[in-house]
Every structure is written in structure tokens, then in C-alpha cells.
Amino acid sequence: MRDFFKPWRRKAGCVTLVLACAFAAGWVRSLFICDVLFVHRYVFGSNNGLLTWVLCQDQGESYSYRAKKLEPVFLTLIDVEWSSGWDKFRIGAGRNGNPTGNRVKFAIAPYWSVVLSLTVLSAYLLLAKPQVAIPKDAVEPTTVERA
């Protein structure tokens, strides 16, 4: 059993599996509670199975965290023009409340995409057979005589 965790791939596989479990727990939590984390110009949100990243033009709060059972305010007060999107993946920009407000940029991704990616990577790292190093043929050093 000790040899199972010797290669770095197995250790990395365990770390990615723990991350996948943490994101899966966040996914379930996001179905009931809206979490919003403010860090300087960035706002990270989690709601209805979606991860939201927002970049604000102005200097926001240095750091704060809010958890509510309501929709996040920053998504309802901002008129967003989505530049691209597929299914629930979206990228867009908008203005804070009015046409002269500060410009903000959005990126939205569903939790399942992160959980699935980390789970597949973890399965590969944990279940793939470790490669055996092939020893190089011992090459005898050549001696050079100096005159």
C-alpha cells in the first residue's frame, strides 16, 4: 500500500480528488445559498449551480464575504451584454446600474464543468499505471590523452 502513493502522480491525483469533492459540495450548497466573495476589484459568486467571476473597474471593498438565500444583487442590478456563450457558459460586460456607471466584466461557468474535469483528471492520475523508468545503458567514459 505504501508503494501506491510513492509516485507524484498518485499524490496529485488525491489532491485533485479532494478539490473535486470540495467543488461538488460547493455545487450542492449553491442550490440553496448564494455566496459572494469580494476581493479588491474581483467578485466571486456561487448561485444556482453556477460559478461567477466579475472584474469591476473601480476599486471595490478590500475583502468581504456574504452568504444569503437570495439572488446576488450584482447580477440583478447590472445590464449585461453577453459577447459569447454556450449553454450556461457565458462571457460578457456591462455597466453598474446606469449608462454612466462603472464597467464590469463577467465570466460564468456551471459547477458541473469544474467537478467533471477534476474528477476525470483525478481518475487518470490515480488509476493509470505508473511508467517504469528504462535504465540507460551504462556508457563507459572515454579517456582522452593530452599531449
Image: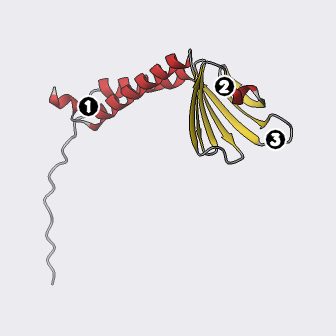
Among the 4 quarters of the image, the one containing residue 100? top right
Numbered mark located on residue 59 in the image: none
Type of residue at label 1? Pro
Q: Residues within 10 Å of mark 1 (few under 14, many from 20)?
A: few
Residue 121 or residue 28, whichever sits in front: 28
Residue 19 or residue 31, whichever sits in front: 31
Quickly name the residue at label 3: 101
Among the 4 quarters of the image, the one containing residue 130? top left
Q: CA distance from mark 1 to mark 3?
A: 55 Å
Marks 2 and 1 close (CB-CB < 8 Å): no
Numbered mark located on residue 72 in the image: 2
In front: label 1 or label 3: 3
Residue furthest to the right: 99
Q: Residues within 10 Å of mark 3 (few under 14, many from 20)?
A: few
Q: Is residue 32 left or right of residue 77?
A: left
Q: CA distance from mark 2 to mark 1?
A: 46 Å
Labels 1 and 3: the sequence-earlier one: 3
**Figure quadrant of the C terminus:** bottom left
Among the 4 quarters of the image, the one containing residue 30? top right
In front: label 2 or label 1: 2
- Numbered disc 3: secondary structure: loop
Quickly name the residue at label 1: 130
Q: Position of residue 1 (x, y in %)?
A: 16, 25
Type of residue at label 3? Gly
Marks 3 and 2 close (CB-CB < 8 Å): no
Query: What's the residue at 67%, 48% (across, down)?
Result: 59
Query: What's the residue at 64%, 28% (across, down)?
Result: 108
Counting the numbered discs, the total is 3
Type of residue at label 2? Pro
